[in-house]
Image: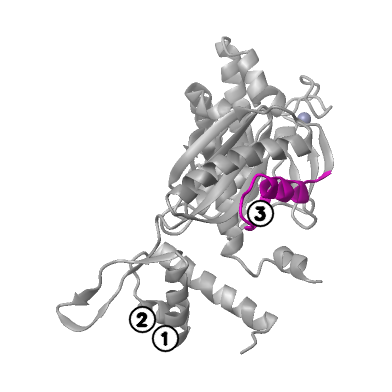
Amino acid sequence: MKTTGDQQLVKRINRSVLLRLVRERPGLSRAQLASHSGLTKSTVSLLVRELVEQGWLGEAPATTTAGIGRPSTPLRIHPHARGIIGIETAVDCVRVVAVSLLGEVWWSGEEPLASTAPAAACAQAARLARLAYDGMAARGLRLSGVGLGLPGAFDEATGVVRFAPNLGWRNVDFLPLLTRALAAAGLPEVPVHTQNEADAAALSEYEFASGDGEDALVFVNCDVGVGAGIVLNDRLFTGAQGMAGEIGHTIVQVDGPLCSCGRRGCAEAFIGARAIAGEAAAMGHTRQAGQFLGVLLQNLWTTFNPRVLVLGGSSCVGHPALVQVAQDTLNAYAASAGMAAPALRVARYGMLAPAVGAAALVLHQYLRPMHPRQTARQLP
Ligand SMILES: [Zn+2]
């Protein structure tokens, strides 16, 4: 039977419904999946067989309830049949990870960034990704996709990096460059996705959480650049041109120090990794930087009302004192308003958050086949 485009889309949606149900509630049986999803038992049975054969789902030993009835087989996301490669092209280094569908990091590698020229940066990332892939292939693991996070505004609709000031990029047609570099390095043809590094980092917390991800979630990445990744209503919120969350360039001091973007008094000029490293010895600066970070968090709280704020990047991961001042500042604002501050924590994956998040991006896209921009790109 010939399947039409509509049927293929319906099948992808049904598969993603089943995968998300099993991820949220590991151990569901086929019968439970049918009742939770509203799909017929025969559809569930067909799709589950396929998902098991393809290594997305695994079956645990069958169980019977009190020894009566047909045994049911608990289903889980398969922890080691498929993997995803995540890449972070940062301002001064490249990080690559291979992770499981559940976010377990199997392999990680890091090198200084040899060149900021886009094609050279892609080639270097692809060579490191090849090492990750060889390790996966040697263990018989299948690759589900490759994701890359970078310090700039990525326009999902066109695949173009609009602006990455710390790399000196403007309007770089990035996705084709990366796809070609991965093919040249000998990786198999798989889905390839790109996103801003803070957006990617937000997904490392959201897609690989156990149970339901926390929504809304804001990830504040304080590295050389400072940006926020925002998950809102089960999606990344990236704005019209991918520039939502560029909080590093919100002004925190009128006529303050000069920032990389040309403005004066941006948050990045106080809490960016270079500002922190330059003033590392000065405790006074750490206090002031922590207060400015606290101001950013307060403003993000009132803008998005997140369930959780997550801090990452070298300014936060390497400086617990700065995080403490930021927390105290946020708490003080909350107390003044007679409210409880939202939960605040440091990134679970530490400095690997953007790379692991880039891998999570592959899963995020795969599990949302009806994403309007993704669907639009597939039209002729
Ligand atoms: Zn700026």
Q: Which mark is residue 231?
A: none
Reading the chain from its start, which is encountered first: label 2 or label 3?
Answer: 2
* Residue type indicated by callout 3: Val
Marks 2 and 1, how far apart in space?
7 Å
* Residue type indicated by callout 1: Lys
* Residue type indicated by callout 2: Ala
Marks 2 and 3, how far apart in space?
34 Å
The verdict on residue 258 being magenta is no
Q: Nearer the viewer, residue 183 or 204?
A: 183
Return the residue found at the far left. 67
CB contact under 8 Å: marks 2 and 1: yes
Residue 231 falls left or right of residue 349? right
CB contact under 8 Å: marks 2 and 3: no
Residue beneath disc 2: 31
Q: Residues within 10 Å of mark 2 (few under 14, many from 20)?
A: some
Residue numbers of the magenta segment: 172-194
Look at 59% across and 26% down and name the residue there.
291
Q: How is the image coloured?
A: one colour
Circle 2 or circle 3, nearest the eye: 3
Marks 1 and 3, how far apart in space?
33 Å
Residue beneath disc 3: 192
Q: Residues within 10 Å of mark 1 (few under 14, many from 20)?
A: some
Q: Quadrant of ligand 1?
A: top right
The verdict on residue 173 being magenta is yes
The answer to whether residue 218 is visible is: no
Reading the chain from its start, which is encountered first: label 1 or label 3?
Answer: 1
Residue 28 placement: quadrant: bottom left
Look at 75% across and 35% down and name the residue there.
120
Residue beneath disc 1: 41
Q: Nearer the viewer, residue 280 or 98?
A: 98
Q: How many numbered badges does the structure rendering display?
A: 3
